[in-house]
Image (spheres, rainbow, N blue to C red):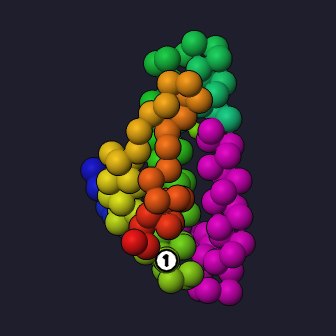
Amino acid sequence: MEIKTIQEWEKEFAKKKGLPPKDKSDADEALKIGFLKLSEEVGELAEKILRKQYDEMQEEVADIIIFACKIGKIAEDYFNQPSTSKIIKKKIEYAEEREYDKKTLDFDKPKGSFKEWNNT
Ligand SMILES: [Mg+2]
């Protein structure tokens, strides 16, 4: 399933249910609600992992992806940001260029941050 498909479904679903954003005036509020819901879903996944309820993990992963897609779509539609799909593709390209340092247990940052790398 494509990111764009999830985003379009969620936008129609929210519209059908009368959820924000209805227009730009409540887009900021919708972002905050979406972020809080995303955080709630991350907590639900944490609970499943801690309780070793592996058979219920994937439904929480799905909830996280849906709310993350919603936030990305609001950013696209109301705050003139590039598409989530495009940024994921760029993030993958960036990750492929990064080298893992076993001493620091972290990846390097070629050409600085992702934003700096993406602008070159
Ligand atoms: Mg959930």
Give the amino acid at mark 1.
Gln
Mark 1 lies on a secondary structure that is loop
Tell me where the magenta segment starts and ends, as one range: 13-42
Task: Find out if the beta carbon at label 1 lies less than 8 Å from the nearest ligand 1 atom.
Answer: no
**Foreground of the two, 66 or 81:** 81
Q: Residue at x 71, y 64 (%)?
A: 32
Residue 2: name its quadrant. bottom left
Q: Position of residue 40 (x, y in %)?
A: 68, 43
Q: Residue at x 65, y 67 (%)?
A: 31
**Foreground of the two, 112 or 57:** 112
Position of 98 with respect to 25 (left or right) is left
Res 78 visible: yes
Position of 110 with respect to 26 (left or right) is left
Give the dominant element type of the magenta stretch: helix, strand or loop.
helix
**Foreground of the two, 61 or 91:** 91
Res 16 visible: no
- Counting the numbered discs, the total is 1
Q: Position of residue 120 (x, y in %)?
A: 39, 72
Q: Residue at x 38, y 53 (%)?
A: 94
Q: Position of residue 79 (x, y in %)?
A: 56, 81
Q: Magenta stretch: residue 39 in it?
A: yes
Q: Magenta stretch: residue 102 in it?
A: no
Which residue lies under the disc numbered 1?
81
Assess disc 1: are there few (<14), some (14-19) or many (≥20) residues with their C-alpha within 10 Å of its C-alpha.
Answer: few
Residue found at the far top of this picture? 52
Q: Position of residue 10 (x, y in %)?
A: 45, 62
Position of 4 with respect to 65 (left or right) is left
Q: Taking the image as four quarters, which one is ligand 1 found in?
A: top right
Q: Residue at x 32, y 54 (%)?
A: 93
